[in-house]
Image (cartoon, grey):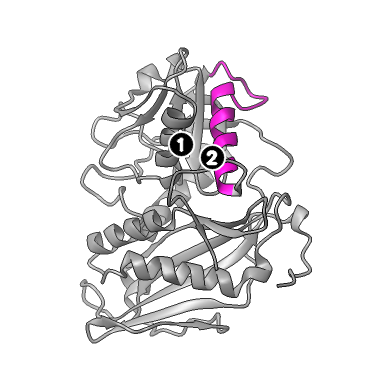
């Protein structure tokens, strides 16, 4: 298929309408078959559950053009599994992960003209989401829901190269100990908007959130998990019941152990020990790993050995290996890369 006439090399990380999207409705206790449609408009009641009580969940993944010209997605089954867990927590009907993967592949296939070419630095971002659609005025779950998938071509997260980030230790809490921090609910991100705008206004790129119970342990940022590297090369990721289980983070830990021969562990990480790490990164779908150069804790600066100019050496190896798997230049584990046919 001929590609769209888009300046792929200069794409930003924003929304561009593509031709098709997938839509399925839940009514009378069951999901319908769903359809791929050109209609990008959603018409719902003014009293819809999503508008009144924020009953909505979402996922984010990407489609890539590999070095040999195939269009692939990366571990979509894990996104489907995570969305199942999110639905259960918010009393929403589960859209089965097998159907989730099928819907993602159908939507990407329908929009293959928008999948950026290999080497352009751009990718096709895929956004599956679900929301309560029928009128709800009492505080209770909706009875009807809609599951949708749309796509949009996006440029690289790092425009003009990798620049390590400066974070601050936030006074705001991201998630309660027994709350919804472990699922991908829209309400979590709404709660973080004031904190991130405030951080930007103060000159910081992101927030480091601590656990709400003791405010002594590292959790995550508003939209990414932390990954640390010790001075002897061990990869460490924070462990908590209120951290979103990042698919990128889990993949990077596997890469560290199985591809790079590094020791890796998931454990509680205290704020006090952060100063002892050599490297720090934020991992997620958008950038794979965003290097962190400095964290400011109420005026006290924590500077990493890797500095403010480039990724640390271990972080760079992790980034290069995982992106190599995604782009088809490195053979990945079975099932990680799913071809769109």
Residue at 38% of width from left, 30% of height from top? 237
Reading the image, the residue beneath label 2 is 322
- Report the front residue among 99 and 18: 99
39 in relation to 129, above or below: below
Percent position (x, y) of residue 200? 57, 41
209 in relation to 75, above or below: above
Residue density around tag 2, few if under 14, some if 14–19, many if 20 or more, within 10 Å: many
The part of the image, by quadrant, that contains residue 275 is top left
Percent position (x, y) of residue 181? 31, 48
Residue at 33% of width from left, 55% of height from top? 82
Residue at 26% of width from left, 72% of height from top? 93
Q: Is residue 28 magenta?
A: no
261 in relation to 319, above or below: above
Residue 130 in view in this figure: yes
Q: Is residue 312 magenta?
A: yes
Q: Which mark is residue 265?
A: none
**Image side of residue 74 versus residue 68, left or right:** left
Q: What is the magenta segment's predominant secondary structure?
A: helix
Percent position (x, y) of residue 6? 77, 65
Q: Secondary structure at mark 1?
A: helix
- Report the front residue among 262 and 283: 262
Residue at 23% of width from left, 62% of height from top? 88
- Report the front residue among 35 and 85: 35
Q: CA distance from mark 1 to mark 2?
A: 7 Å
Q: Secondary structure at mark 2?
A: helix
Percent position (x, y) of residue 129? 42, 67
**Image side of residue 83 versus residue 200, left or right:** left
- Magenta residues span 304-326
Image quadrant containing the C terminus: bottom right
The part of the image, by quadrant, that contains residue 166 is top right
Reading the image, the residue beneath label 1 is 252
């Amino acid at each position: 298929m001929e590609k769209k006439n888009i300046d792929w090399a200069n794409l930003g990380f924003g929304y561009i309408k593509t031709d098709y999207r997938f839509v399925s409705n839940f009514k009378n206790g069951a999901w319908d078959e769903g359809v791929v449609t050109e209609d990008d408009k959603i018409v719902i009641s003014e009293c819809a559950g999503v508008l009144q009580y924020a009953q909505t969940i979402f996922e984010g993944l990407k489609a890539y053009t590999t070095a040999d010209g195939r269009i692939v997605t990366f571990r979509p089954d894990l996104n489907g599994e995570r969305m199942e867990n999110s639905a259960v927590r918010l009393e929403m009907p589960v859209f089965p992960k097998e159907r989730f993967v099928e819907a993602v592949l159908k939507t990407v296939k329908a929009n293959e003209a928008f999948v950026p070419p290999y080497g352009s630095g751009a990718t096709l971002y895929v956004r599956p989401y679900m929301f309560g659609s029928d009128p709800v005025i009492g505080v209770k779950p909706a009875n009807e829901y809609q599951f949708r998938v749309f796509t949009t071509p996006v440029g690289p997260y790092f425009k003009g190269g990798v620049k390590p980030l400066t974070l601050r230790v936030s006074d705001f809490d991201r998630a309660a100990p027994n709350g919804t921090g472990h699922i991908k609910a829209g309400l979590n991100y709404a709660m973080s908007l004031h904190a991130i705008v405030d951080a930007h206004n103060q000159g910081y790129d992101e927030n480091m959130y601590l656990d709400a119970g003791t405010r002594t342990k590292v959790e995550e940022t508003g939209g990414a998990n932390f990954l640390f590297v010790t001075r002897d090369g061990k990869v460490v990721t924070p462990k908590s019941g209120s951290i979103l289980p990042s698919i990128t983070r889990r993949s990077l830990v596997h890469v560290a152990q199985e591809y790079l021969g590094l020791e890796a562990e998931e454990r509680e990480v205290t704020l006090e020990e952060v100063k002892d790490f050599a490297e720090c990164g934020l991992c997620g779908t958008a950038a794979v790993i965003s290097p962190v150069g400095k964290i400011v804790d109420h005026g006290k600066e924590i500077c990493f050995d890797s500095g403010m100019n480039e990724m640390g050496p271990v972080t760079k190896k992790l980034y290069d290996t995982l992106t190599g798997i995604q782009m088809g230049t490195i053979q990945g584990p079975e099932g990680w890369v799913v071809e769109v046919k």
